[in-house]
Image: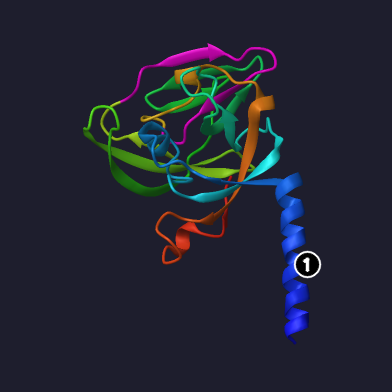
Amino acid sequence: MLKVIAWIVGILGVICGVLYVTAFDVWVVPADDPMLAASIEPAIRAGDIILVSRRTSSERGYLVRCADPRPENPGGFVVARIIAKQNEKIDIQADYVSVDSKRNPSPYACDPITMKHPQTGEDIELVCSTEDTGEIKFGAYRAKSRSGIPTKATVQNGMVYLVSDNRYIHNDSRDFGQMDPATCQHVLFRVYGKEGFSDAAHRFNVIW
């Protein structure tokens, strides 16, 4: 029996090793970047252990990890959602996003939250709604009683426009510009949440 168990563990180890080298990257979401930590909620949170595809992605609606283009953060990453692709016109008003004058429906509410703004230290009340692209559903935060600076842009050829799930406290293309999708990889799966195995809602779940 011990030999059988050892063989099973060995085979699983080899499979996991091959997948790690060829298909997935295991990444711990940094907890030392307050703006990143605020902007990625509610889909993922700082301290989460997640699986990221090693293949690049340009699929609309996917949450992606991309190489940070800012020179002050060499080797760092940004995490946001692909909302618009080349030649599309994006319009962000009062934390709502429209692409070519169309907005994703938000048929469901999700849990609101009060979050401390990483830069000002002010407590911000955020409401949550579940956006539906037709293929992907995800939660998005918006400020309850205020709105961000309006943004309009046309996505350049070969680029994508990223928008944080936290529309008010964001770290996305409004801050660092449009992105080359060749630097972006799909965030696939959360293995472990920052609260540990006691937090069943934030472990072993698919991320969209």
Looking at the image, which residue is at 46% across and 55% down? Answer: 193
Q: Taking 76 as reference, is 152 above or below it?
A: above
Q: Is residue 81 left or right of residue 110?
A: right
Quadrant of image for the N terminus? bottom right
Queried whether the magenta region covers residue 153, the answer comes back as yes
Q: How many marks?
A: 1
Q: Is residue 26 left or right of residue 57?
A: left
Looking at the image, which residue is at 47% across and 57% down? Answer: 202
- The residue labelled by disc 1 is 11
Quadrant of image for the C terminus? top right
Looking at the image, which residue is at 76% across and 59% down? Answer: 15
Within 10 Å of disc 1 (Cα), the crowding (few <14, some 14-19, many 20+) is few
Color encoding of the figure: rainbow
Q: Taking 194 as reference, is 93 above or below it?
A: above
Res 8 quadrant in image: bottom right
Queried whether the magenta region covers residue 2, the answer comes back as no
* Residue nearer the viewer, 206 or 109: 206
Q: Amino acid at mark 1?
A: Ile
* Residue nearer the viewer, 140 or 134: 140
Q: Main secondary structure of the magenta part?
A: loop
Task: Residue 151 in the image: state x and y as whole percent.
Answer: 44, 15
Task: Residue 182 in the image: state x and y as whole percent.
Answer: 69, 26
Q: Residue furthest bottom?
A: 1
Mark 1 falls on what kind of element? helix
Task: Residue 45 in the image: state x and y as whole percent.
Answer: 44, 46
Q: Is residue 169 left or right of residue 108?
A: left
Q: Which residues are magenta?
A: 147-166
Q: Residue furthest left?
A: 122
Task: Residue 140 in the image: state x and y as whole percent.
Answer: 44, 39
